[in-house]
Image (tube, rainbow, N blue to C red):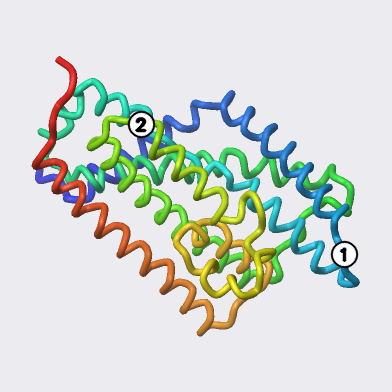
Amino acid sequence: MRTRKWTPYASVFRLRARLETQYRAAALGGLVTQAFFGSVLVCLYTALFDGNDPRALQETVTYVWLQQMFFRMLLNNDSELNGLIMTGGIAYTMIRPIDQHAYWMMRELATRLVGALMRLIPMVLLQFILPASMRMTLPESPVALMQFMVSLVLGAVILSEISGVRDVVIMKTLDTRGISAMINLIQMIFSGNIIPLTLFPDKAQALIRYQPFAQALDAPSRMYLHAQSAPEWLFNLSVQLGWIVLIAGLGRLLWARQMNRMTVQGG
């Protein structure tokens, strides 16, 4: 029976997702960490709040919790691929009749999405035991929730494609720490995880709102807080899709070049 072209990539997504569910201790540790930092940030913004509009503070609290709930989407480093690169085992994957870029990107996507979902339900339940002033609010409407979910998945794809570019740099430099540390720091700052992007100066909003890292969590969070009109939503989706096409195109080009010029390490 002839194998369909998408079957290997669907299979690796499913297997990686299943494997990710085995890391329960890591999920618990991440849950405790994100709950702690979320509580600290909420208390900090509440103490520093200066304004007459309590809704603004409430939206900031919700923004912080959304960032913490989906923090796992931001940070991921495929240790298996790194090990294959550093030991020369990448040679065995190169002989597989598959698209290497698509294969590893699907692994990344499964890890980010499933890892985030494993922390999501406990974080939602946590809201019911927090004081009312520290709780996140419900989405503005079912439409806002739908827009949030669609945008969140697209944001995960963008992050996975960025990781694909990072992996090529690792193959070229044989350094797994430098490029990963740089990208992780940039992602945390410009996704709004450290400081909500809405708190940046107004003059910077037009630029900072549409950069690729903001599409991961900042853009979905804005949709969660306020349902967008159809034209505005379509525009924001086009921004996310545009970044996916651009970064995926760059990633595929770099992967193709690197596969043709691979220097296998180890022995």
From what the image shows, is residue 96 above or below residue 230?
above
Residue closer to the observer: 4 or 249: 249
Residue type at tag 2: Thr
Q: Quadrant of residue 144?
A: bottom right
Q: Residue at x 61, y 75 (%)?
A: 203
Q: Which residue is mark 1?
A: 50
How many marks the image carries: the answer is: 2
Q: Quadrant of the N terminus?
A: top left
Question: What is the x, y in percent for residue 68?
Answer: 65, 46
Secondary structure found at label 1: loop
Question: What is the x, y in percent for residue 62?
Answer: 73, 57
From what the image shows, is residue 35 above or below residue 245?
above
**Outermost residue to the bottom:** 231
Q: Residues within 10 Å of mark 2 (few under 14, many from 20)?
A: some
Q: Quadrant of the C terminus?
A: top left
Question: What is the x, y in percent for residue 41?
Answer: 76, 47
Q: Quadrant of residue 38?
A: top right
Residue type at tag 1: Asp
Residue contact at pointers 1 and 2, CB within 8 angstroms: no
Q: Which mark is residue 176?
A: 2
Secondary structure found at label 2: loop
**Outermost residue to the top:** 267
Choose the circle earlier in sequence order: 1 or 2.
1
Q: Quadrant of residue 87?
A: top left
